[in-house]
Image: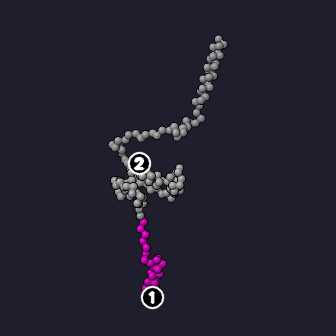
Amino acid sequence: MKIKFLLFVCILFSSALFAQQTVLDNVYVKETAITRQVIPYPYLREADVMWSKRIWRVIDLNEKINLPLKFPSSKSTHDRKNLMDVIYDAIKEGSLTAYGYEDDEFTKVITLKEVENHGGARVDTVQMTRPDPPMILMIQLLLKTLIRIK
């Protein structure tokens, strides 16, 4: 009888020892990024789409929050690249296709040589020079009004 009681107590305490390993301190189990898996998008038919919108964004690399995309500006660092170097290297490698910006549908494929020539940059500001500085125009206007008054 004592042996059965002792055996029962040992089993009871041993199960209590193993139960302590499953206690959660938080609401969820913390995982590292290595153990996480990407959740794939579900299949979406065109008939299931009720509404869609195309959004164009301009990334201003001079803004403070976007500075990690701009720097390092040279290829002296081997562990980091800026955004344009990553895109250019992918085009050189052939894993990324470059398209022209002439239309919104991106139908014209451009070559690496064309990317090197203009690099996607274009002039959208036209500098206009005035023949006369504004001060001279003001003086002329003032003289005309003075002549009319006399």
x 35%, y 54%: residue: 109
Secondary structure mostly seen in the magenta stretch = helix
- Magenta stretch, residue numbers: 125-150
Which labelled disc corresponds to residue 113?
none
User: Which part of the image, by quadrant, shows the N terminus?
Assistant: top right
Which labelled disc corresponds to residue 150?
1
For mark 1, does the 10 Å Cα neighbourhood hold few (<14), some (14 to 19), or many (20 or more) residues?
few
Which labelled disc corresponds to residue 95?
2
x 60%, y 26%: residue: 18
47 or 76, which lies in front?
Answer: 76
Task: Judge left or right: residue 54 versus residue 24.
Answer: left
Residue 20, given in percent of the width and then of the height, sits at 61, 28
Magenta segment includes 117: no
Give whichever of discs 2 and 1 has the lower sequence position: 2
86 or 128, which lies in front?
Answer: 86
Does residue 104 appear in the picture of this structure?
no
